[in-house]
Every structure is written in C-alpha cells, then in structure tokens.
Image (cartoon, rainbow, N blue to C red):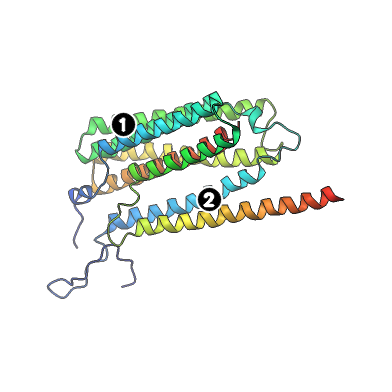
C-alpha cells in the first residue's frame, strides 16, 4: 500500500482485508490543501523579505511614507477581517443545515471581499495615475508584487466562492460541497492572516 | 466500499461561534491598538516599530488558533507538523536573506565610502 494513511488504523478487518485506503478522503484532501497553504506561506515570506530588502531603494522616487494612506489600509484590514468571520459563519451554518444563513454568510463574504478588492484597485489606480508605477523603483516593484499577489489570491478566492455557492445551491450540503466549503474557509482565513502582515509591516511600519 | 457520511465529517470540525467571536474581538482590538499607536505617534519610532511587530505576531497567533485551528489536528498531527516545518523554512529564508543582504549592503557601501 503506497498511499499515505492519515489516521492510524492498525486493525485489519474481520475478513482479513487491508483497511480501505480511500476511507479518509476528507482528511487527506484537507491535509493536501493545508500543505498547499504552507507552500503559499513560503511564497509570501519570500515576497515580504524582498520588500524588506528593497523598500528603501526608491531610486530618487517617492518613499513609502509619502505614498501610503493608513486609513485606507485600516479599512482594508477591517473589511478582510469581517469577511473572514462571515466565511467561518458559513461553515458553521452548513453544520446545522441552515441554508438561508449559509447563503447570507457567503454573500456577505463575497460583498466584503469585492469591497476590499475595489479599495485596493482604487489605491493602485491612484498610484499609477500619479506616475508611481511598478517600473519607477525597486521599492514600487516589490510593493506591487507583494500586494498584487495577495490581491490576485483574493480575486481567485472570489471566483471560487461564486462557483462553490452555485454548487451548494444546486446540490445542497453534501460531503463534496461541505469539503469545498471547508477548503475555501481555510484559504480565506489564510489570506486574512497574510494581510495582517501586509498591514503591519508594509503600511504601519512604512509610514 | 465504506463511504464517509456527512455527519461523521462534520463532527470533526473544530469551529464554533464562540471561537469566531473571541478571534474577531481580539483581532479587531490588536488592529486598532496598532493603528492608534502609529496615528498618534505616542511613542518613539524605535519603540513603535517593536510594538507594531509584536502586535502583528500576536494577531497572527490569535488567527491561526481561532480561525485556522492550528494545534488541534488529530493523531498523527500532519497539519501541525507541516505548519512547524513551514515556520522553520520561513525563519531560514527570512532570517538568512536579511542577514546576507544587510551584511552585503554594509560591506559594499563601506568600501565605496572609504574610496
């Protein structure tokens, strides 16, 4: 048996069968997704450290203190934090099969996620309009790469949320849709966690 | 073939409304404190950066515990082992990069300054 057995199960069935390797599909899938999130953490760690090394290399251009608006960053932090909580509520209401509450939570998560993206897009738009694009200095390249990668994750998370909500709407809460909901909540909480570091290290320390 | 039932899977889910409420309140509080300290410039810049970093890591721990359920995987703890390994890799990458880059910076800028 080459497959990874997640849960220790030393007992061989009464007829002498080897335990079915597929029985812990749910635990295996969540573990696999968890491992992906861990590698994503390393990716963001590398981008953070790139930013830390380059954030003073402004090439005569504007510094972070001149560009960043703390109130915008604070607003983004609160939007993402609340959407993280509503996403958790969605999983909790699926446990009790409360469909209305589940869809309301998912819609709130989506609306808050879209608001977050719009605030971020507005910030990027303002920077670009004032001529502070990613091509102006190493600092701005590192900034746009770090924040842009996070924003891209959020964008794909929102697409995932739409598809998943439709699946839950049409097939109800089954083993498969519940698993997708749990994986999405892990992804969304993880993105909120990454944002805390962006908020603290990039914005609060950059001003 | 034995199939997993939905109830069986859902029973193992760790979240609760209470945990989310505590996690949310703590996160919001930590975010607000960090924001207030930077906005009001209440402390010296040096101390301020230490506080902001400390608050960020505190909130990361709060969210990992209350939202991501780190430290509550069951035997044989693959999730927590993977998390620990990820932290080790992160420490090596971030600490090592900072050490190398700032050391290099000091040396290169030092010789240029001396010329």
Q: Which of the 4 quarters of the picture holds residue A9?
A: bottom left
CA gap, disc 1 and disc 2:
30 Å
The chain to which mark 2 is attached is A
The mark total stands at: 2
Q: Nearer the viewer, residue B109 or A85?
A: B109
**Location of residue B14 in the rendering, given as x and y in whole percent from the top left corner:** 26, 46
Residue A105, numbered label: 1
Q: Nearer the viewer, residue A151 or A200?
A: A200
Disc 1 element: helix
Q: Is residue A40 visible?
A: yes
At x 33%, y 66%, the residue is A4
At x 38%, y 38%, the residue is A161
Q: Which of the 4 quarters of the picture holds residue A85?
A: top left
The chain to which mark 1 is attached is A
Disc 2 element: helix
Q: Which residue is mark 2?
A: A43
Q: Residues within 10 Å of mark 1 (few under 14, many from 20)?
A: many
């Amino acid at each position: 048996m080459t497959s990874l057995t997640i849960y220790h199960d030393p007992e061989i069935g009464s007829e002498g069968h080897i335990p079915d390797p597929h029985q812990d599909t749910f635990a295996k899938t969540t573990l696999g997704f968890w491992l992906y999130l861990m590698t994503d953490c390393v990716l963001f760690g590398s981008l953070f450290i790139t930013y830390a090394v380059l954030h003073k290399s402004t090439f005569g251009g504007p510094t972070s203190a001149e560009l960043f608006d703390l109130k915008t960053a604070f607003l983004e932090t609160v939007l993402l934090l609340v959407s993280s909580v509503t996403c958790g509520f969605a999983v909790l209401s699926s446990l009790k099969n409360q469909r209305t509450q589940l869809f309301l939570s998912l819609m709130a998560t989506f609306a808050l996620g879209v608001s977050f993206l719009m605030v971020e897009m507005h910030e990027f738009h303002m920077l670009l309009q004032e001529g502070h694009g990613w091509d102006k200095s190493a600092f701005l390249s590192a900034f746009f790469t770090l924040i842009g990668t996070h924003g891209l994750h959020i964008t794909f998370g929102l697409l995932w949320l739409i598809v998943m909500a439709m699946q839950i709407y049409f097939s109800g809460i089954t083993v498969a849709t519940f698993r997708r909901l749990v994986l999405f909540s892990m992804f969304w909480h993880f993105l909120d966690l990454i944002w805390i570091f962006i908020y603290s290290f990039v914005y609060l320390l950059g001003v | 073939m034995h199939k997993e039932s939905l109830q069986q899977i859902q029973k193992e889910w760790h979240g609760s409304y209470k945990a989310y409420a505590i996690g949310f309140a703590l996160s919001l509080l930590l975010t607000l404190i960090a924001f207030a300290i930077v906005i009001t410039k209440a402390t010296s810049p040096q101390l301020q950066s230490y506080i902001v970093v400390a608050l960020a890591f505190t909130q990361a721990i709060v969210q990992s515990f209350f939202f991501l359920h780190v430290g509550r995987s069951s035997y044989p703890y693959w999730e927590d082992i993977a998390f620990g390994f990820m932290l080790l890799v992160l420490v090596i990458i971030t600490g090592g990069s900072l050490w190398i880059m700032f050391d290099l910076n000091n040396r290169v800028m030092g010789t240029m300054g001396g010329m």
